[in-house]
Amino acid sequence: MAQQDTERQSVDEFFDDTVDAEAREAAHRERGTSRPITVVGNPVLHKECQDVTEFGDDLARLIDDMFASQRTAEGVGLAANQIGVDLKVFVYDCPDDEGVRHVGAVCNPVLDELPAAERVLDDSNEGCLSVPTAYAPLARPDYAIVRGQDPQGNPIAVQGTGYFARCLQHETDHLYGYLYIDRLSKRDRKDALRQMAEGTPRYPVVENV
Ligand SMILES: [Zn+2]
């Protein structure tokens, strides 16, 4: 992993999503109710979600349900439209490449454009709860910064490396209507859909009508 910290912003500017990660994740999920996961083909996954404008109890409950659903499905990230809610918010519980656990929620996320010179592509495997049982290699930058708002509406910025960087990009994509398979070649996309057709999800899903 390339370290270019001298070029990057100081860590102080970023939300420290590693503090009390285990306790925060448990508190959310214990308050929440697990919901079934929408899968590729469901219209809510294929359009841009609405901006979050109300940062109250309803949003807090949604986030709790998202953490509960993420845990049931054994995911490392979950976007609201993956439980059928048309709102720009995602949650994550994801290790980085050093094994450090990151837990948080981001509303209205926007990824920073990284200068091409700083971009190092990582072509690890990627999967998605909404494309159950399928995996495919996908090249993505190994570093990401996402800016948005926390569940109270305060501005936050989250940075990630390695697998966690992939997660931040993947979840932000969801909220703009894109699945990772939309970034694959035709052939790899077809193969992912075949893997999905042949597999059986290990968690409840919303059947497409
Ligand atoms: Zn996904």
Image: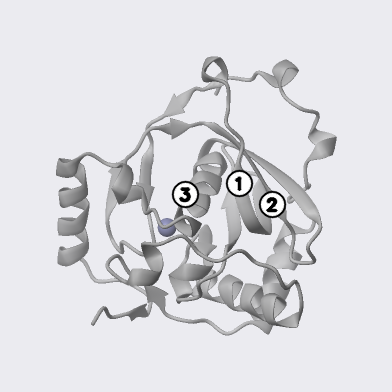
- Identify which residue, 105 or 134, lies in the foreground: 105
Image depth: mark 3 or mark 1 in front: 1
Q: CA distance from mark 2 to mark 1?
A: 6 Å
Instruction: Give the residue number, with chain letter if any, for mark 3.
Output: 170
Say left or right for 194 vs 103. left
Give the amino acid type for the residue marked by disc 3 in the picture: His
Disc number for residue 18: none
Circle 1: is it few (<14), some (14-19), or many (20+) Cα within 10 Å? Answer: some
Residue drawn where x is 22% and y is 52% of the image: 192
The residue indicated by pointer 1 is 110
Camera-nearest residue between 11 and 156: 156
For discs 3 and 2, the disc positioned in front in the rendered view:
2
Name the secondary structure under disc 3: helix
Spatial CA span between label 3 and label 1:
12 Å
Q: Split into 4 quadrants, where in the image is the N terminus?
A: top right
Q: Position of residue 62 (x, y in %)?
A: 62, 77
Provide residue 14's location: percent of width, then percent of height. Answer: 78, 41
For the point 59% across and 78% down, which residue is it?
A: 65
**Mark 1 and mark 2 in contact (Cβ < 8 Å)?**
yes
Residue under label 2: 148
Crowd around label 3: few <14 · some 14–19 · many ≥20 (10 Å):
many
Find out if the beta carbon at label 3 lies less than 8 Å from the nearest ligand 1 atom.
yes
Which residue is pictured at 22% across the width and 62% down the height? 196
Q: Residue 150 sits in which quadrant?
A: bottom right
Is the residue marked 2 within 8 Å of ligand 1, measured from its CB? no
| Picture quarter with the C terminus | bottom left
Amino acid type at image mark 2: Gly
Which of the 4 quarters of the picture holds residue 52? Answer: bottom right
Element carrying mark 1: strand
Residue 53 image position (x, y, % from top left): 69, 68
**SS at badge 2:** strand
